[in-house]
Image: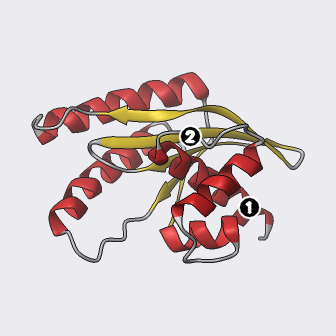
Amino acid sequence: MRIIGIDPGTGILGFGVVDFEGGTAKMVDAGAIKTPAHTPLDERLEEIFDGLTDIIKDTKPSVMSIEKLFFARNVTTAMSVSHARGVAMLTGRKAKLEITEYTPMQIKQTLTGYGKADKKQVQEMVRMHLGLRDVPKPDDCADALAAAITHYLMQRVK
């Protein structure tokens, strides 16, 4: 099973593509789509769509696992991220991917066993699951890989 994980954002959208075979996980590709600050929103969303379309075309995942939004304070940031999230989901849909969503708490709980784990704990578990020497950077990339791993682990318990 090949899964693309997405950590949505307008300035930085993290992605991580992971292969799962025989109980082992292997990172295929990971990184971030970055859009310049102070660029009109429609242009940023187009860059996200085009970049993600190319990544999906190149890596051929069958599932997209995307982080659900959770914002308690900043409504402006939430709106901006929700635009990017919608574009990512539409891109996945257009590529005929199964789309799954997980809250940050579900991802933390699944990877670390503790729903309020900090970023460093999640990143270390991503590193361990994928057998990497270093934690993937930037943080958005590690978060996207965590979303992909979460979907795989959640499917195993069904």
- Tell me the SS state at disc 2: strand
Q: Is residue 97 visible?
A: yes
x and y, in percent, of residue 127 in the image: 69, 47
Where is the C terminus found, in terms of image quarters? bottom right
> Is 91 left, or right, of 136 in this rendering?
left
Mark 1, residues whose alpha carbon is within 10 Å: few (<14), some, or many (≥20)?
Answer: few
Q: Residue at x 79, y 70 (%)?
A: 157
Amino acid carrying mark 1 in the image = Leu
Residue 62, quarter of picture: top right
Q: What is the residue that sits farthest to the right in this orientation?
A: 22
Q: Residue at x 52, y 48 (%)?
A: 144
x and y, in percent, of residue 47 in the image: 27, 30
Q: Is residue 98 visible?
A: no
Q: Residue at x 28, y 58 (%)?
A: 82
Q: Of residues 124 and 1, which is closer to you in this image?
A: 124
Residue 70, quarter of picture: bottom left
Residue labelled with disc 2: 16
The tag on residue 91 is none
Compared with residue 100, is residue 87 higher up or lower down, i.e. above or below? above
Amino acid carrying mark 2 in the image = Gly
x and y, in percent, of residue 126 in the image: 67, 51
Residue 28, quarter of picture: top right
Compared with residue 97, is residue 123 higher up or lower down, i.e. above or below? below
The tag on residue 153 is 1
Q: Earlier in the sequence, mark 2 or mark 1?
A: 2
Color style of the picture: secondary structure
x and y, in percent, of residue 30 in the image: 55, 34
